[in-house]
Image: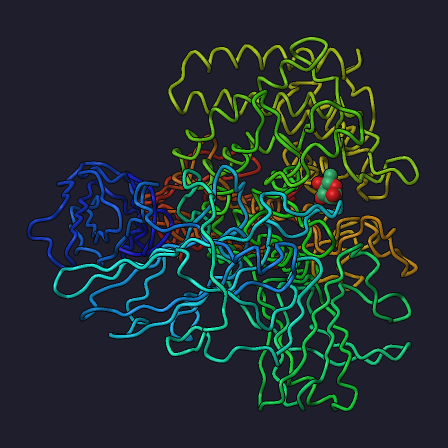
Amino acid sequence: MKALTCEYHQNLLGTDLPIPRFTWQIQSDKRNTYQKAYRIQVTKINNNFKNPFWDSGKIESNQSLHVSYEGEAVSPRTRYFYRVKIWDNFNRESEWSTIQWWETGLLNKDNWVAKWITPNPNFFDPKSKPISMLRTTFQAQREIQSARIYTTAAGVYELYLNGKKVGEDLLAPGWTSYTHRHQYQTYDVTDMISDGKNGIGVMIADGWYKGELTWLSKREIYGSERAFLFQLHIQFTDGSEQVIISDNSWKSSTGPILLSEFYEGEMYDARLEKDHWTTSDFNDSEWIETEEFPLPFDQLVAQENWPTRVTEVLYPKEIIKTPSGETVIDMGQNMVGRVRMKLNLPAGRHIKLYHAEVLDKEGNFYTGNLRKANQRVEYISKGTAEESYAPYFSFQGFRYVKVEGLSEVDEQTLLSSFVGEVMHSDMNVTGEFTSSSELVNKLYKNIVWGQRGNFLDVPTDCPQRDERLGWTGDAQIFIRTAAFNYNVAPFFTKWLHDLKSDQTTNGTVPFVVPNALGDYISSMWGDKNYTSSAWGDAATICPWIIYQCYGDKRLLEEQYPSMKAWVDYIRAQGANEYLWNTGFHFGDWLALDSEENSYFGATPEHLVATAYYAHSTRILRDAARVLDKMDDEHRYNELLTGIINEFRKTFIAKNGRMITQTQTSNILPLIFNLVEGDTQKQIANDLNQLVVKNDFHLNTGFVGTPYLCIALSENGYHKTALRLLLQETYPSWLYSVKKGATTIWEHWDGIKEDGSFWSDDMNSYNHYAYGAIGEWLFRYIAGIDLGKGEIAYKKITIQPRISDYGLNSANASLESPYGNIRSSWQVDQNQVLVEVEIPVNTMADIILPGAQVMYISEGGGELNERPEIRVSSYDSENVTCTVGSGIYTFSYKKTNSLVTN
Ligand code: RAM
C-alpha cells in the first residue's frame, strides 16, 4: 500500500465534510496487479482497531478512489484514525496500511460560541491603514492533552501564540465569495500552549475583504470593518475542557505595519514593534477594548483549498546597475511572493523596494505595465543585529527589485541580504515534462511558473498589476494543463463553490470569481448581463475536467445545478434556442488577427459563443448521464443536436468550409465535434493551410490557442503542430522563450522584436493562458492521456507521437490518482525506445507508432514471451499493446515514416 489519502490530504485537519472519502494507491512487485477487494477501518482511539468505530468489512470491489466513509455520523472536533487493506488478483492480502487520520472541524454554525470582534471604531478609524493587532491572555487550568484553534478574519490574518506564529499559512482565510462562504482554519496548537499563563495575538489587514481590488480602485467590497473570530478548545488529561473565545475582553492596538495592501505593497516601521506583544506578560494597559461585531456565522465553512505558503526560496542572480543609475536585484525568475531582507543597519534607515517584471530595452527598471499597482515595500530599521523582514499581508509579481536607501552597501552584502520567497497555494506537484529541445523544456518550466504565480488561492489572470482577478476564461482554458502539473482538485473545488455562489439567479456567470468587478464591464459595454461565452463556460468545463482527471463525482454533483443554470441561461439568449448571437463577448481575445489596436480577434464572436454553447451542452448531457439524470440527459442531447445543426447552418458555407477563414474559426468545430466526415477533413485541411500560409505561425488568441495544436494533431496534421511548437520567430511560444521569458506572457508580443513593449494598459508578463499548450505536450508529445471515455486514468492511453521532425525524445510523468504514469520515448536513427509505467489497479493501451508486431521487443525479450502483454490491434501505422500495471520497455526498429503528415 502506498499513499493513502482522505479528501486528497494525507492527514486532514479541520474538515466540515460529513462523509469524507478515502483513496489509496497500491504497490506491487508483479505486473498486471489489480485490486479485488478492500477493507477500511476507522477508530476514534489511535491504534485501537479492536472495536472499530466503523469497519467496512471485506468489500469485493476494485474501487480504490473516493471510497466514502459509511459509518455513524461524525461529531464535531473529533479525530478519526483510519487504515486500509486490500486483496489483489493474485490472492494476496496486503498488510494494513499505516494509520492516518482526519479530524472534523466545527461542522455547523451552532458550534461557534465565539463572537466576531473588531477594533473599537471610537479609537480606530476604520479607514485607517495601520494593520490591527488584537490580543488576550488566558490561564490553562490543568495538564493539557490537546488543543485546537478554529479561527478566521474579515480581512487577512496572522495568528501568534506565546510569541510564535500559529501554522505556516499565509494570507488566511484566503479569498472566497465572503458573503456566501467564508473559510475558517483549524490549527493544532497542543505543543504551543503552556500549563499556566498564555498569550495570543493576531494581526489583521484589509486583504481581499476590504482592501483595494480591481483597476477601478474598489474598496470594501465585502465589508467596511476588519473583524476576527477565534475559538480555542483545550482538552485536559482529566477529560475536562476549557474554551477560549474572541469577545470584547480582547484588546487592540496598532504597531509596525503602517500599511499593507496587495497592489500598493507594505510599509513597516520596525521602531514601532511591540516586543513580546503576543506573550502573556506583555503590558497591554494602554491598549483599547475591542467591540463585538454583528457578522453572521451561516457562511462559515472549513478550509477547502490548499493553504497559501512559501514553497521555495530563490537567491538573487546578480546586482544590476542600470544606465540611469538604479540598483536592481535580479532574481533570475519572474516570481510571485515577497522579498525577505536580513540586514544590520543603524536605527531609522528608510529602505524602499520596488518590484518589476522586466527591464526596458535600455536596461532600466520598468513598472509601466503594473498600472496603478505600486508594489512598493518600505522598511524603517530599528537598529538591532540581523533585522529580518518580509511583507506580511502583501505579495508582489516580479523578477527585478529596485533598492533605495542602501547606497553604501556593497554588492556582495546586497546579494546575501535578500531572498525571494515564492508563495502560492501549496498544491502537490504531479507532473514533469522534458524533451530533446532545451527551448521546449524552458517553455514547460515557464508554464509551471505561470501556474505557481497565479494559483495563489484563486486562479488569477496575472499576479502583478492592479488586477489579479479570478478571470473565468483564463481558468477554463488552463485547467487541463494545471491538472497535469499539480493536484488542483481542492483548489478548483473551492473556486467552483465560489463560482456557484456568485452565479446570478438567471444563470449568469460573472467575468471574475470571486466577483470583485460586479456589473462594471456590462455597464461599460452596455450589456445587461455581465458574462461572456468561453468565460462563463468555466461553470461546465472546470467541474468536468476535475471529474475526468480525479474521478471526483461529488464535485460534479455539487456543481450540476450551476452547470445546468449556465446552459439554460445561454438557451434563453439567442434569436433561437440553438444559437447564441446576442450580447457582449470577449471572443478570441487578444488574437493577432484583430484590427489594429483592438483586443478582439477576427473570429466572429457568435461563432465562438455558439461553439462553446455546444461544448457546454455536451458536457452537461454527459454529466447528466454520469449522475443518472436520464430526463436531463435526453433533453440536453436533443438540445445539443439542435445547436450542432444550427452551428452548421449558420457558420459553415455550402462548400463545407467555415464562413470565416481564421485559424480559430476552423479550430472550434474540430475540437468541439461539430463536424464530421468530409466537412471535418475540409476544415482540418483549411486550418493546416492557414498555418502553412502563415509560414507556420499562429495568430490565435485566448479561445483558439489552447486547442490549435490538438486540432491539428487529432486531424492528421501533427507535424504542422510540431512546427508551430518549435517555431522560434514571432509569433510563437518559443519567441518569448528566446526573448528571455521565465513565465508566459499575456500578449504574443509583450516584448516586440525591437525590444519595445506592448502598451502599458494591459501587458502582463505572467499570464498562464497561453501556457495551455502544456496539455498538448503531455497528451500529444509524451502521449499520456485518459483512455477514451475513462476517468481518473483508470484506463490510460499511452500514445507517443514519435516524429522524425524536430524532437527525438520526450519524457513525461503524471502522479495520477492511482499512482505514477510515465511515458518516455527516444528515437535514434530508426531505433525507437518507449518506456512506460502504469500504476496498479489500472490498465493501458500503449500505441507504438511505426512498429511491426514481430520486431518489437520488451525488456530484452520478444513479445510472444510476454503473456501479460496483449497485442490488441495493429495496422500499417501502429501496434497497440494492452497491459496492466508495471514498467515496460519496448524497443523496435521503425518500419515506416513515423509521422506522415
Ligand atoms: C484582461 C486579462 C484577462 C482576460 C480579460 C478578458 O483583464 O487579459 O486575462 O480574461 O482581460
User: Is residue 802 something one can see in this rendering?
Assistant: no
The answer to which image quadrant residue 499 occupies is: top right
- Please determine whether, in this image, residue 320 is positioned above or below residue 438: below
Q: Is residue 6 left or right of residue 528?
A: left
Observer-nearest of 4 and 186: 186
Q: Residue furthest left?
A: 50
| Percent of width and height locating residue 664 | 76, 32
| Percent of width and height locating residue 225 | 57, 50
Observer-nearest of 819 and 634: 634
- Please determine whether, in this image, residue 231 is positioned above or below residue 641: below
Quarter of the image that includes the C terminus:
top right
Q: Is residue 282 left or right of residue 155?
A: left
- Please determine whether, in this image, residue 896 is positioned above or below residue 190: above
Observer-nearest of 494 and 593: 494
Give the residue at x 71% y 84%: 349
State how the image is colored: rainbow
Q: Is residue 146 left or right of residue 53?
A: right
Q: How many marks?
A: 0
Quarter of the rendered image showing ligand 1 = top right
Give the residue at x 69% y 20%: 610
